[in-house]
């Protein structure tokens, strides 16, 4: 037995088990692929074995190919080498699936003669989310089982599906309640005959019509077009040739800038989705009775935890519980909850006066939306009521003023963020995924572990930050908006800036959405001075009564859901530009200026140790600012351009605005180390 794959004989069948990696299924890395190839060779020559079963140890099957290999490539055997070897094995190979089976592990299972699954097994393929197509033959094997339409729908969806239901019903040859390996061993000893033609090719004209319709619909991305093309080839080529062709297509896509960026973003998200490390208390105390407390309580209830509302004002907990009850009923009406689940959720909600609730709490989430001047008193109240070992997560002001909060001394003589009191910069509602967890020097490790486990339970992606004003998200937002305003001050119209980026929502639309007062407050918090804060375009427009989208007039004019450039701000812009030289900036110039400003802000975060990696900066930009995932984030954009070129532009443009564009120690080190940011 290797340390990657176990080989044993069960009756007349060789059972190959991919060994788990701790609590997780074992990855299909190069060493595991080589071990499986060796085990297949051994099984084929083993006179005791009439068939082969491939499964995973523990409660899973196998994981996919590691992100590092997807990014950089790997020496053989490749995943396509392994699945091709399975497909041509002289003895029948049966896959015994359980748990969640996705990506390369699903490729492996599809290459087998047949598949047996435990009831409840789920399958998914996420290749297109990485700018790729499958590398292990799924575009060839899956259509043979379920046809072109169902295969394309599944491979493009990136969604988990039941392995034995709906359009995927033909994927499994048997579904069992338990002992999936035993059922697979029995099937390997008496395997099903191969069907010719395969069931997915039973209607060849219908198959071709589906391919034609998909191509006529003009897929938007290169990976979607390649996916459809590969599924089309499945009907025309023998399996081995089709799998080889797919492998070439996949490798071509892997080398593209788009795939590199998407893989980088996925890898950063995977790192931030930390698994729960410690058990959580069954009840979380939420301090507050406003909109922030509602969002936090609702998200916590969704996880199955109980919530105890600690009210700020008399009757606040009862009022908030009523609002949460109405939201639960809305979920029932919309079909998102059953009546029984709604009743159980309401039973997990309690509340009352703050002091009594805090006294019995084992974990506190502050969601009062309190101003900074009130936080020292609030933290004193919490510290005086809760037990000394109880973690407290402060949400008010954390994103913008974490540095001041850490320095500000409460009545107990400690900083507002210290010891077991941590900060969370987040939007706690259901739609939000990203969290900046503020970990001050000397933070209690147990409190950090509880906070990260809570966020894992809530399915949040977490980056740890040192307590500085703006953390990462607000610094990126400040730089993006300031660079957009720099372009406008030098002659570009706001709608031209937004249009040049080709983002779902450009920086001026973002400004209007959050309200035009926000950027000035942000710049003050970041210490950029009153003069700079007062000179923003948003501040000038605000003085004219234009507040942003809420008032239907900001940088743009709003008519319902329609957004229009507003000629009425022409005179305001002319006055605001003053004597600044007007430049002829192309769309490429605009994109380069804004992305470089974002990269400079990220480099400043790394220089100051706010976060530990460029990937965390990129994740913040993608998840919190809404930057395109296919960009990979600002640091990935800078790296793709070339770090020497990035440094040249920062040096040159620092003469235009040294706050926006400036040199960086981290950048200099990355250039010395080969032109890539260290992860």
Image (cartoon, rainbow, N blue to C red):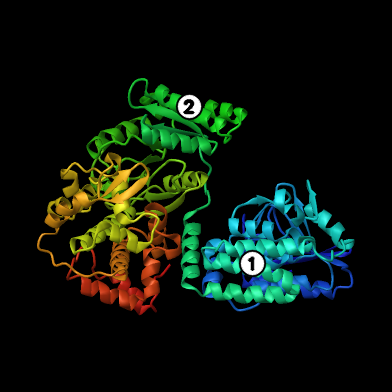
Q: Is residue 569 above or below residue 611?
A: above
Q: Classify the position of the C terminus by image quarter.
A: bottom left
Q: Residues within 10 Å of mark 1 (few under 14, many from 20)?
A: many
For marks 1 and 2, give the CA distance. 47 Å
The circle on residue 28 is 1
Residue 490 lies, in percent from the top left, at: 18, 64
Q: Is residue 271 above or below residue 223?
A: above
* Identity of the residue drawn at 36% across and 70% down: 638
Residue 243 lies, in percent from the top left, at: 69, 73
Quadrant of res 173: bottom right
Q: Is residue 276 left or right of residue 287?
A: right
Res 4 visible: no
The circle on residue 326 is 2
Q: Is residue 157 left or right of residue 394?
A: right
Q: Nearer the viewer, mark 1 or mark 2?
A: 2
Circle 1: element type: loop
Sequence-first disc among 1 and 2 = 1
Q: Is residue 478 left or right of residue 140?
A: left
Q: Residues within 10 Å of mark 2 (few under 14, many from 20)?
A: few
* Identity of the residue drawn at 42% across and 36% down: 295
């Amino acid at each position: 037995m290797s340390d990657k794959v176990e080989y044993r004989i069960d009756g007349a069948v060789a059972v190959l088990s991919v060994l788990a990696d701790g609590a997780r299924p074992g990855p299909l890395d190069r060493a595991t692929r080589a071990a499986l190839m060796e085990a297949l060779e051994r099984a084929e020559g083993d006179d005791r074995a009439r068939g082969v079963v491939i499964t995973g140890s523990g409660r899973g099957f196998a994981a996919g190919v590691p992100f590092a290999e997807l990014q950089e490539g790997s020496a053989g055997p490749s995943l396509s080498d392994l699945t091709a070897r399975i497909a041509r094995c002289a003895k029948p190979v049966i896959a015994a699936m359980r748990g969640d089976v996705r990506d390369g592990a699903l490729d492996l299972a599809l290459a087998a003669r047949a598949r047996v699954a435990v009831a409840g097994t789920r399958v998914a393929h996420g290749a297109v989310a990485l700018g790729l197509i499958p590398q292990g033959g799924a575009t060839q094997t899956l259509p043979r089982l379920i046809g072109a339409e169902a295969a394309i729908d599944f491979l493009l969806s990136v969604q988990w599906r039941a392995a034995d239901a709906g359009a995927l019903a033909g994927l499994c040859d048997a579904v069992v309640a338990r002992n999936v390996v035993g059922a697979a061993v029995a099937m390997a000893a008496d395997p099903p005959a191969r069907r010719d033609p395969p069931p997915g090719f039973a209607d060849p004209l219908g198959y071709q019509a589906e391919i034609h319709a998909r191509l006529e619909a003009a897929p938007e991305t290169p990976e979607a077009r390649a996916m459809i093309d590969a599924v089309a080839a499945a009907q025309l080529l023998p399996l081995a040739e089709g799998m080889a062709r797919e492998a070439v297509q996949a490798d071509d896509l892997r080398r593209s800038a788009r795939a590199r960026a998407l893989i980088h973003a996925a890898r950063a998200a995977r790192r931030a989705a930390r698994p729960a490390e410690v058990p959580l208390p069954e009840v979380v105390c939420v301090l507050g009775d406003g909109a922030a407390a509602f969002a936090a309580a609702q998200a916590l209830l969704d996880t199955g935890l109980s919530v105890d509302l600690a009210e700020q004002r008399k009757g606040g907990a009862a009022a908030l519980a009523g609002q949460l009850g109405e939201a639960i009923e809305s979920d029932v009406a919309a079909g998102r909850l059953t009546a029984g689940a709604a009743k159980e959720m309401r039973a997990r909600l309690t509340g009352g006066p703050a002091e009594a609730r805090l006294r019995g709490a084992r974990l506190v989430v502050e969601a009062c939306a309190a101003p900074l001047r009130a936080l020292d008193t609030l933290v004193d109240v919490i510290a005086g009521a809760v037990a000394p070992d109880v973690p407290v997560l402060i949400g008010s002001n954390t994103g913008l003023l974490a540095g001041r909060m850490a320095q500000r001394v409460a009545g107990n003589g400690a900083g507002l963020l210290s010891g077991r009191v941590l900060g969370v910069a987040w939007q706690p509602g259901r739609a939000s995924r990203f969290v900046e967890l503020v970990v001050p020097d000397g933070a209690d490790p147990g409190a950090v572990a509880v906070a990260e486990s809570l966020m894992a339970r809530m399915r949040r992606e977490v980056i740890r930050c040192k307590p500085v004003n703006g953390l990462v998200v607000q610094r990126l937002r400040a730089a993006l908006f300031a660079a957009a305003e720099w372009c406008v001050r030098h002659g570009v119209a706001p709608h031209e800036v937004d249009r040049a980026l080709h983002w779902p929502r450009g920086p001026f639309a973002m400004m209007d959405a959050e309200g035009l007062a926000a950027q000035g407050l942000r710049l003050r918090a970041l210490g950029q001075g009153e003069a700079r804060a007062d000179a923003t375009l948003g501040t000038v427009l605000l003085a004219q009564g234009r507040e942003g989208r809420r008032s239907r007039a900001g940088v743009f004019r709003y008519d319902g859901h329609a957004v229009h450039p507003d000629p009425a701000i022409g005179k305001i812009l002319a006055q605001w530009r003053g004597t600044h030289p007007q430049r002829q900036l192309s769309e490429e110039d605009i994109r380069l200026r804004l992305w470089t400003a974002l990269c400079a802000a990220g480099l400043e975060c790394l220089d100051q140790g706010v976060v530990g990696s460029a990937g965390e900066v990129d994740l913040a930009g993608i998840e919190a600012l809404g930057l395109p995932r296919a960009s990979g984030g600002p640091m990935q954009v800078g790296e793709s351009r070339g770090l020497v070129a990035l440094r040249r532009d920062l040096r040159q443009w620092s003469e235009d605005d040294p706050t926006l564009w400036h040199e960086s120690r981290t950048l200099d080190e990355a250039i010395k180390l080969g032109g890539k940011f260290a992860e």
